[in-house]
Image (cartoon, grey):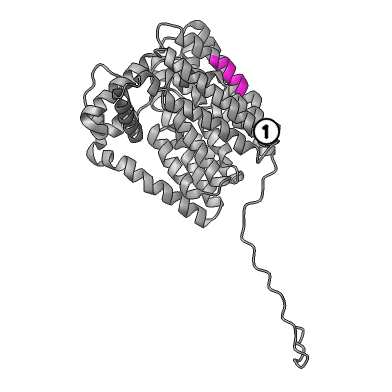
Amino acid sequence: MRRARSVVLTVSALAFVAKMVLAAQTRGPADVRFFDAFARAIAQVGPVRIYEHPMPRLPVYNHPPLASWMLLGLDELDRLGIPFAVLIRTPACLADFVSAVLVFEILRRRRSTGTAMACALGCALSPVLFATSGYHGNTDSVAVMFAVLAAHLLADRRAPLAAGICAAVAVSIKLIPVVAIPALLVAAFRAGRPVLVRFAAGLAAVMPVLWGPVLVTVPEPLRQKVLEYEGGRARLWGFVRFADWAGASDAFIVALHSDFSLLFVLVCMAAGVWLAWVRPTAPAYAVALSLTLLLLLSTGSAVQYLAWPVVGLCLFGLWEGAAFGVVVGVVTVCVYSGPSAVRWNDWALNLAALGWLLLAAGIVTGLRRVLAEPPPALPHRTLPVVAPREKSPSAPASPVN
């Protein structure tokens, strides 16, 4: 066990260094410059007013409140002489390191040490994460890491208060882990009332602190730009891509983007809740199912979204994570080597379709593997054993009814 953990830590650390070298030697896509502009605007108007601040030459600022505070801190470090292009990619690279370690720590309790080590190394070396974290730089990997960390703390470390805090942090960095929150609540409920109360207390203590000032000050811009954000309208991925290939009408594709997005989110939540109910002692699997389904059903198209299911697929199994990581990793190379991250060539589109099919297959096989695992018993309180009192020699025998 110690040797396997050392291997995972070493390889994950080397992968982190390699990603940071990539970040230091490349400019990255346009998002790096967009984030730099966002950070400068936040430094001027503050992390609360940024949602109503006009930025006509920039994309919609659709990031939750904690991301705003992170950008404010990165801007301060940039003023000290550390290049912003490196700073913006550092949190995601660190998150990938932690995620690989979490994969090992979660799986070693449920499968063999060799399997846990192989899946963790697959996460650490995933080509998708090299591209989306080391080159692109966004908050997707950070949000996913905190969601998986919340599941680990809840079930394996028996720290429900810290788990609730991590869950709140996850959705305050990027909204995507919101699909996993119901599953975590169900897992906490199944673990007993004290666990549920502590998890909910951690969640409820942090959410008002991070979201409260923005909700009170600029509720309408926050609703429009963050809570109702539907992703890009490009037809590059999933059902939208397949509908476009099939010659579907523009009205149908617009309906996919608008009318079906909430339904798909509810499906992801419901699937996670179901798995958390039948496997309450392994909520990381429920988080993995919610996040992998989220990309499978996503009607939005962006390269960095491809990072959402990597950790979850590696929790399901080695081949699930490796197959998706390699094929979709090639997609990222094709896209990033092109003129724009929102213009995918035919190679990228065809490989992305194959990656979607591999994602669907990985969810099915991974779910079958999870359900085949013998479910460990839920922790329960044992009644104290009271030794019978010795009868006094003069005491009469009790009648037997």
328 part of magenta stretch: yes
* Residue 208: quadrant of the picture: top left
The x and y percentages for residue 186 are 52, 47
Pick the residue in front: 340 or 46. 46
The number of discs equals 1
> Magenta: predominant secondary structure element?
helix
Residue 257 in the figure: left or right of residue 371: left
Expressed as whole percent of the image width and height from the top left, the position of residue 154 reads 53, 46
Q: Is residue 378 magenta?
A: no
Q: Residue 239's x, y, as percent?
A: 49, 20
Q: Depth check: give the residue in front, 280 or 25.
A: 25
Residue at the spot 31% in from the left edge and 23% down from the top edge: 78
Q: Is residue 184 above or below residue 65?
A: below
**Mark 1 secondary-structure assignment:** helix
Query: Relative to residue 269, is residue 156 drawn left or right?
Result: right
Q: Is residue 274 above or below residue 38?
A: below
Label 1 sits on residue? 3
* Quarter of the picture holding the N terminus: top right
The magenta segment is 321-329
